[in-house]
């Protein structure tokens, strides 16, 4: 077998921002002689599976000052944690580990005391409600207040950088699953979002985004040859991330979104639904790029734990045609028709205790009201178009690729 294939494969890989961070002279400019904090989790690895914290700890003239974890924790060992998590100590590196999904979601002055640089290396999944981007925004706010420089290591948007879809967050519905008026599927990388949040939404921190090399907007994660490490406990697969912009809306209902199975967000169902008839009805709607396979599953925990649930598994046949948010809405409308026990989940949700969780997720009450009034799904999709077009014009200013 020729030995020339491995270098070719290596050259085809997308080079991550966390890898470029350590290139000279960038490393000297941003890191040398600095006390550095790191916001990361287990997905913060490079192409050789080296974790950004380990690389920083080994870097010459860098002092590792503290570690920060987003939702699910620095080690991503906490499930759908609605309970505040505790701070800790990293025994290996002998530095504090602060939870930013705790009594504070923003680093405090004490946490940042004596720190020069805050490095953020988090894997976003391209969906407005994914909290890691707001952990980043809160770090920018705190860093601005404390005079700390922020370095964001850019990573691929795993579901591509072209698709934009879904309702825009409305004023009055801001939360930790939606701080800024962006659509459900935003089509930006975390570095691009950092620039958008910092500049357009007026945070004004001293920000340096380390770009990737070799990434193009049409790439899904499996095109990049970058290792897939589950970014959070219930997104174990890229398939799950692709459907997530739509099926995450099921968190606002009593329908199981497949938590407690090996295919969360790909499997949806309830104990009352007959899967064959349900899937056949959905397939007749002709939603683009998708097939609904009838399925019965039994969640080991979360909604309907230890009870057989009928519904479907979502199989994406054509990523370019597939519309995840529209598909999620069609599924919710179908469950509402098929299951007499269908209900909107009641508060609390995340840190919100008043508004309906579905409305928090959707970004307003409009989508829920459209579903309740049986507005055709295609018409619901059209209602997003002007907002999506306006956001597309805005985001172009901040695109890096």
Image (cartoon, rainbow, N blue to C red):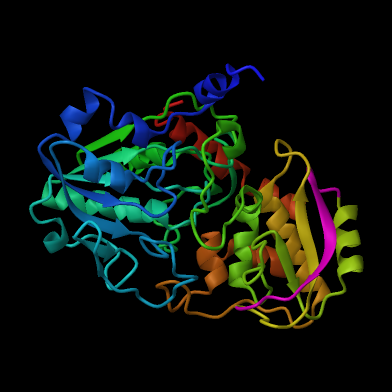
Residue 289: say if magenta: yes
Q: Position of residue 184 (x, y in %)?
A: 55, 51
Q: Quadrant of the N terminus?
A: top right
Residue span colored magenta: 286-301
Q: Is residue 94 left or right of residue 399?
A: left
Residue at image x 55%, y 29%? 217
Q: Position of residue 128 (x, y in %)?
A: 49, 52
Q: Is residue 120 visible?
A: no
Reply above or below: 146 against 301.
above
Q: What is the quadrant of residue 50 in the picture?
A: top left
Residue at image x 82%, y 66%? 295
Residue at image x 66%, y 64%? 262
Reply above or below: 116 against 270.
above
Reply above or below: 371 against 204.
below
Q: Nearer the viewer, residue 348 or 200?
A: 348
Q: Position of residue 101 (x, y in %)?
A: 34, 67
Residue 47: say if magenta: no
Q: Position of residue 369 (x, y in %)?
A: 65, 67
Total residue callouts: 0
Q: Is residue 226 visible?
A: yes
Reply above or below: 80 against 1.
below
Q: Is residue 349 left or right of residue 262?
A: left
Q: Is residue 263 left or right of residue 29?
A: right
Q: Nearer the viewer, residue 77 or 29?
A: 77
């Amino acid at each position: 077998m020729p030995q020339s294939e491995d270098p070719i494969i290596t050259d085809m890989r997308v080079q991550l921002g966390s890898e470029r961070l350590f290139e000279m002279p960038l490393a000297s400019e941003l890191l040398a002689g600095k006390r550095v904090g790191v916001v990361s989790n287990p997905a913060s690895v490079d192409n050789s599976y080296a974790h950004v914290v380990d690389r920083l700890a080994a870097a010459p003239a860098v002092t590792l000052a503290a570690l920060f974890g987003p939702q699910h924790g620095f080690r991503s060992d906490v499930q759908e944690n609605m309970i505040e998590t505790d701070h800790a100590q990293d025994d290996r590196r002998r530095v504090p580990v602060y939870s930013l999904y705790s009594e504070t979601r923003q680093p405090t002055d004490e946490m940042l005391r004596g720190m020069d640089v805050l490095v953020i290396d988090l894997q976003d999944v391209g969906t407005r409600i994914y909290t890691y981007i707001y952990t980043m925004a809160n770090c920018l706010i705190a860093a601005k207040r404390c005079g700390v420089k922020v370095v964001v290591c850019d990573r691929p948007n795993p579901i591509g950088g072209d698709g934009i879809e879904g309702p825009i967050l409305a004023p009055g519905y801001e939360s930790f699953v939606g701080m800024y008026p962006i659509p459900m599927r935003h089509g930006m990388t975390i570095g691009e979002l950092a620039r958008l949040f910092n500049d357009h939404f007026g945070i004004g921190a001293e920000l340096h985004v380390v770009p990737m090399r070799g990434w193009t907007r049409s790439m899904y994660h499996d095109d990049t040859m970058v290792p897939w490490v589950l970014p959070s406990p219930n997104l174990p697969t890229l398939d799950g991330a692709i459907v997530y912009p739509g099926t995450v809306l099921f968190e606002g209902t009593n329908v199981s979104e497949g938590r407690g199975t090996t295919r969360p967000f790909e499997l949806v169902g309830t104990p009352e639904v007959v899967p064959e008839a349900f899937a056949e009805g959905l397939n007749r709607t002709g939603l683009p790029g998708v097939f609904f396979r009838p399925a019965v599953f039994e969640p080991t925990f979360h909604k309907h734990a230890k009870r057989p649930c009928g519904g479907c598994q979502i199989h994406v046949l054509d990523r370019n045609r597939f519309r995840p948010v529209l598909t999620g809405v069609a599924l919710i409308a179908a469950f509402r028709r098929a299951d007499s026990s269908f209900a909107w989940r009641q508060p609390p949700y995340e840190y919100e205790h008043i508004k309906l969780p579905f409305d928090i997720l959707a970004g307003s009450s409009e989508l829920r009201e459209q579903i309740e009034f049986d507005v055709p799904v295609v018409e619901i999709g059209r209602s997003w178009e002007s907002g999506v077009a306006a956001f597309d014009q805005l985001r172009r200013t901040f695109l890096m690729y």
